[in-house]
Image (spheres, coloured by chain):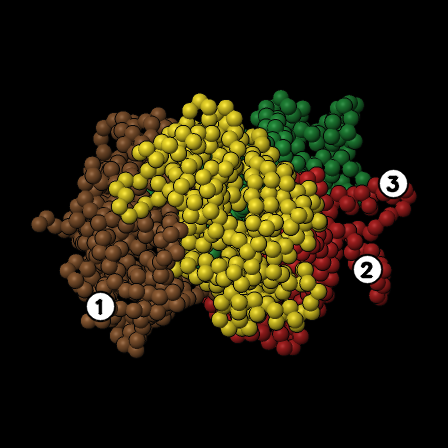
Chain colours: A brown, B red, C yellow, D green
Amino acid sequence: MSEPVLEVTDLVKTFQVRRARGVRVEKASVQAVSGVSFKVDAGQTLGLVGESGSGKTTVGRCVLRLLEPSGGSIRFKGQELVGMHRNELRGLRKQMQIVFQDPYASLDPKRTVGAAIAEPFEIQGVAGDHGKMVGDLLELVGLAPDHAGRFPHEFSGGQRQRIGIARALALDPALIVLDEPVSALDVSIQAGVVNLLDDLQNELGVAYVFIAHDLAVVRHISDLVAVMYLGKLVELASAAEIYDRPAHPYTQALLSAVPEPDPEIERQRNRIVLEGEVPSPINPPSGCRFRTRCPKAQAICAEQEPLLVDESPGHAVACHFADATPVTVWQDGTFERPVG
Amino acid sequence: MARFVLRRLLWAIPTLLLVTFLVYIAIRIGTNPSEAYQRSNPRANEAKIREYEELNNLTGSYLKGYWGWLTDFVKGLFDGGESWQRSIKGRRPVWPEMKDAMANSLRLGLAASFVGITVGLGLGIFAALRPGSMRDTSVNTGAFIAFSIPPYVSAVLLQLLFAVMWSRWFGHTLLPTSGVYPPGHQGFDLWLMLKHMILPVFVVAIQIIAVYARYMRASLLEVLNSDYMRTARSKGISERRVLMTHAVRNSMIPVVTVAAIDIGGILGGLIITERVFSYPGMGDFFLTAFGNGDFPQLMPFMVVIVTCVIMFNLLADVSYAWLDPRIRLD
Amino acid sequence: MSDPVLSLRDFRVSFPTLNGTVQAVRGVDLDVGQGEMVGVVGESGSGKSVTFLGLMGLLPKTTIIEGSAKIGGDELVGRSSKEMRPVRGQRIAMIFQDPLSALNPVHKIGRQIVEMIRAHQDMSKGDANKRAVELLDIVGIPQPDQRAMQYPHEFSGGMRQRVMIAMAIANEPDVLIADEPTTALDVTVQAQILEVMQRIQHELNTAIVLITHDLGVVARVVDRVQVMYAGRAVERGTVDGLFKHSIHPYTRGLMESIPALGRERLVPIPGSPPNMLQPPPGCAFAPRCAHARPICTAEIPELRPFGAGETACVRADELAEEYTNV
Amino acid sequence: MSQHQFVEGTLEYEHTHDGLDDVFAEGLTTDSMSPRQMARRRYFKHKGALISTVLMAIMVLFVLFSPITARYGVNEAIFKAEAGRPNSYLSPRSEAWFGTDDIGRDIYSRMIYGLKVSLIIGIAAALFATIVGVTVGSIAGLRGGRFDDLLMRVTDIFLAFPFLVALLVVRNFLGELDFLTPIVGERTSIRFIILLFVIFGWMGVARLVRGSVLALKEREFVEAARALGASNFRIVFRHLLPNSIGPILVALTNTVVAAIIGEATLSFFGFGPDAGSGDTSLGLLVSAAKGGVTAGFWWMVVFPCTLLCLVALCINFIGDGLRDATDPKLVHGG
């Protein structure tokens, strides 16, 4: 088997928070990501899901070393990125790219779209007719080559996102981190961008790390799905597994919280409504970080941190009471599980 | 809060020491003591100059000299300025003169700040409530024009108008244009004093008005566009209440911070105005001392200024926290 | 249905700008009955929020509002902002998308609720305070008496939205307008807030208008739906009727573009929403519609009964046939 | 109040969500204009800025063609026809439109020469201050940490000081440093005055640029450039500076005004440049006006003072127009 495009092992990212609270500088250390591991193969998509504060975006930034990881290892095509010298890294940047969430902030308002897409060629010193290459890229993402002379404000959100994708594709990367690429778009526009990403992957064989909070989109686009909660990976499995047989109580609750666009299903569904909200990462709960909101929590959850172990082949869960057998959840939030 | 203030006050001490040390060096070099002494006392001999330098701790290393000055200064704080060295000119004691100057300046500064800040804030609110209207444009433009007139220019123009042209046209002077009292006046006279203050206060206040009207206007406009103003309106409370309880208080937060830090601006305006109106305040005191290279006068003056700046910075922080519950001080 | 509590007829909102007049809302009809939750769905620029901000008189003074909007039979259009005061907060209350910026950061939560109560009820401060604590309890905020003494920044996102709801129901309004109340929240918190809103709908019998772009949210909580596009309602009906038998190509387009299980490829709606300075003639959706014919651009289609609901498509009959044949 | 505080006092804006974003989100920006064109259009909409630009242009033309526009030389006295004695204190008349001063020099002509020197001081000081300020500000903004803290602390104290006191103390201090004299000349030289205002001017610029860089560096397009492997140098020059050109220009105009008024202030109190060199400045003219007040020679006061204020006002207005034109809040939705 060929080696994976990306292999992340025990990634840790700690922030020294220095918040100026008006006049006072407050110092605290926040572990935004603690011990996250996963692999992405060529042409594959890993969906990274979680709510705000789960650290999914931080993982994405660390993978590209836009943020300096505090620990662990990130291997890109077998090469260790952590600790790699800047100059060496610059060469590798050709092969890994990022697309951002906010289509308004991700393009320099003062430069034309053509200049934005040509920037990768300039930075990496790619020879050739940049104008033509930009035109080709614009066509690839479904825009017209003569759009190159326009400024970002002349485009709609969906079009801007396509421009961002064109820029990321310019250097023919092996890996693209997509950081909530469609969550700022209207649903009718979002579909087009998701399709584009799908097509590009089939055509170019690029691997994606797809970061999102929208579980429906993630299910649609991902091969593997990793669920994060408060900086930890709680479940990692193929998309089908995660959605059909979620084993971690958090994943189960998350899936049950997502409304289905079908009133009939909605009425029949049993929901797990989680209590409370994600705790502060400055002071995470002891043991299992989810235990404060977990309907299954027991004494052991506060004492012992559950490890991410294979519940079944290819399906890893970090829970003392992981159980992927279909559960019945009653309206009042209690569970019933087949015995045996 | 109390702990924060205490800690900041403790912090103020090293800051004060560091800044005064730098000021000591700057003034020691800048005044060129021996030259200054000679200028003020043309018949002084070498020995006299050396004695002056020794007394004022202007010899030896900077650190040692500073320490010497500091001990004298601190002693002076407890004996009514007795231990401070005497002025370079006429060997007058520094403290009594400075005390009077401070009182005069304080009176002028407080009056001008009060007038300036209230009128400025009022105008700012007045303008912001109808953005884009005539009254907004005129307040904004007026503030811009007032801001572009340096205080000494307005002072000189007012002097020309009230002291010279008025008497030429109408045969009497309307307002006095210099001093605290007419020359030769003895004793206290409130009305005369106030009359002498009108023009200087006006000059300083105009600058303050210009600045605060613009701050307040910008800040209030910002607040008026915020979401919580929409919420307030959606409650069905009166527009007056919406403005008073929601808009004005919130827009004061940035203004107050600016105000306390802007103390330098007000002091600067005072110095200039006092000079033009021959008003015997700190500004006049400073400029005379500076012109003479009067080290014994300059240092206490600088200490007062530095202390003011540091204290007002602290005041800014405290008032900020008091107005904005998101800021916690401890 | 008994007499509607809130009723809009040919409601229009337009903004004069330097480049011309933006016709944000171009004739909307809507009835909301007591204790009913109506979803208003649309994408950005559809005019869904503007309709209700205009109704409440919360848009800039230069905004032009026409048509009719009645609350319990009383006309609102044409009222001065002073005349609107007894309506706002008492008969219609509103909650907004971003609960952090919608709450005044320098006032305590309790005080902000008390302000709402005392604006419309003759109540002593002490009683109003007690009532505020009670309201916080109703919306599920633990330790309400202590929380009332805290500032908005000390609350989490979901708790803030609960506070907004508590404030909105303080005077037991006839209608509660919720403008994308869960968009800024995480899904697990969204579920909590939707639950609170449903409880209020049933326990207080309040009519709720839920403005959202999320069809999933609509499917979960509302009774009836109105779909908006380019400042007009294009389709409406009961939630089941609409999800099962929508006719309007825009509604269908919206549903098909949602990623769903077993759908290999998503179907986007081509193009982008029209420029509301010069909306296209006739059906505003025609330029993006796969089923458009020349007839579509002739005149603006009105909503007319079709199947279980109403739809604003001139080709509704033909399309219904087409859909069933496929 | 010094011009300095104004640079500082500019309230920071934060983009707030307003209810109309929804309406204006899509399909409104049909006009195809580059950001520069939009900025230009907005600038010309600012009436004060427009009028000020025209006035400034006229003044600059007068200065450029001073041998023609000025009727007399700088130090040329208008002599009485008969005895050859200078025509002191003439009130305005056809031979001397704005009157003459104590030694019979034409005030109108001297105002043009004075304006020239003042503009040179203002522009030179502002340019150098901007270069220093932009460099320091962008380093502080990008690097952050200790350097940034120190910079903020120092500028805080400096800016809170009464302008004139700090100016005078620093002036004398620098004047006594003998090693500086070969470079910037005596403390009464124009070069020295410029140096002084560079020292006081860069801080305002640095703080503005720092704030702008701090805000921009979190923006995704900067991160995108970094992800492409762009060097810091490229990020600063291709992305950060072009996007903070607005605040930089505003700071520049503020510094021009601060230097012109500052020079006048120094001159007014007798610490300005030396008039003996056959040159004059607005400050020296205003300072000379003091002598005219008590005697009622109003023209000596009114004309130079008006010109000084007018120049300050025009440049301030131009700055305000630039602020409007480049305000990022106004870029969207047109």
Q: Which numbered disc, 2 or 3, marks the residue that appears first in the sequence?
A: 3
Query: Is A28 displayed left or right of C21 in the figure?
Result: left
Mark pair 1, 2: CA separation = 82 Å
Do residues under tags 1 and 2 come within 8 Å of each other at their CB atoms? Answer: no
Disc 1 residue type (three-letter): Leu
Q: Residues within 10 Å of mark 2 (few under 14, many from 20)?
A: some
Helix, strand or loop status at disc 1: loop
Chain letter of mark 3 equals: B
Q: Where is mark 1, residue-wise?
A: A307
Q: Which mark is residue D33?
A: none
* Left or right side of D53 for A256: left
The chain to which mark 1 is attached is A
Seen at 29% across and 37% down, the residue is A196
C-beta proximity under 8 Å, tags 2 and 3 = no
Kind of residue sitting beneath label 2: Met
Query: Residue B168 has which mark?
Result: 3
Q: Is residue B68 visible to us here? A: no
Seen in the image, is B12 located left or right of residue A298?
right
Label 2: which residue? Answer: B193
